Structure formats: C-alpha cells, structure tokens
Image (spheres, helix red, strand yellow):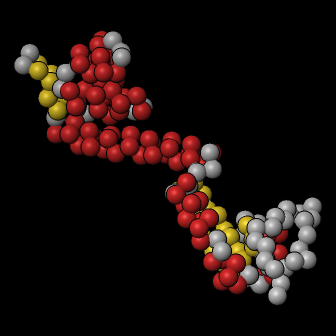
Amino acid sequence: MELRHLKYFIAVAETLNFRRAAERLNVAQPALSRQIKDLESSISVKLLDRDTSGTRLTEAGGVLLEEARDIMERIDMAREMARDAQAGRRGHLQIAGLGSMSLSLLSDTLSRFRLAYPKVDVSLHDIGYRDLMSELRAGSVHLGFSFDPNLRETREFKSVQVVKSRAR
C-alpha cells in the first residue's frame, strides 16, 4: 500500500464516481481504476462495489476511508511541522535571567514573540550569574539576561545592552 493509493481511494470513496475522482486528481480514469484494483489486491480486501447502478463503499471500504483520512491528515501535519521547524517557527526557547526583575522586563517582548511564533515554547528560568554562564555554555539555555555591568562580549557570547538606567 502506497500513499498515492490512499489519496486515490479517498477521492473515489468521497465522490463514489471514478470519472469525477479522476478529474479531481488530474489523472486518467483507467489509471485511477488500476490503482484502486492494485490497492484492493495488495490488502486482499474488496473496498468498493461497482456495478451499472454506481459505486458503493463496502464495510471494509468505510473502515479504510476513516483510517486513510487520518493518515493523510497526519502526513499533512508532519509536513507542516517539518517546514515550521526548518523556518524556526517551532521549537523550544530557554531564557534565563537574574532575578524576577530581568524576566519582568521581557513581558512585552515575549508577548510579541509569542504572537509571531505561536508554535515556539518559551521557558523562563530565574538563576544566578554562575549558573547562567554555565547553562549558556552547556547550551541548555539559549538566551540569558544579567544586570552585571562588567559583563563583556567574549568569543563564546555576544553581549547586547537592552536596558540602560542611571545610578542615583
């Protein structure tokens, strides 16, 4: 059984008409008939009753139709998930900060990020400076925030000032 067999079977089962199904699929009707016969042969089950009054699903055909729809839906979802992952629209982002103050500064930015990338799960962690650096080095945290004014850019990390305040 191949995916095209399921796709073709779904079209025939939904239209109960080989000619309309062939048009919908953009294939020749004899080729479609052959594929359906191949499918029935490969699983040793009669899926459709065909006679002069038309085409009807057998009980086994009804069962296969439900399963075939589920399979095709899962395949479409898998394609979409793979495309989302490749485009960076899916995944998990680990953010760590020093104290709740640094994480609260992110609330507006995170809201906008979540709207733009709804399939990316974001986790926030409140950890100390040493833990922050070791988690960043280990790769278990993707983004870190610190109030340390002495933190400088290194070969390992890029440092960007996101908030500036005046000392009083």
Residue 164 picture location, percent across and down:
79, 73
Residue 141 occupies quadrant = bottom right
Residue 65 picture location, percent across and down:
26, 39
Q: Residue at x 28, y 28 (%)?
A: 11
Residue 163 occupies quadrant = bottom right
Q: Nearer the viewer, residue 49 or 111?
A: 111
Look at the image and tell me whether residue 108 can be seen: yes
Q: Residue at x 76, y 67 (%)?
A: 162
Residue 100 picture location, percent across and down:
66, 83
Where 155 sits versus 151, above or below?
Answer: above
- Farthest left residue in view: 53
Residue 131 occupies quadrant = bottom right
Q: Nearer the viewer, residue 161 or 145?
A: 161
Look at the image and tell me whether residue 37 can be seen: no
Q: In the drawing, does residue 27 fall left or right of residue 112?
A: left
Q: In the drawing, does residue 94 fall left or right of residue 72?
A: right
Q: Residue at x 62, y 45 (%)?
A: 87
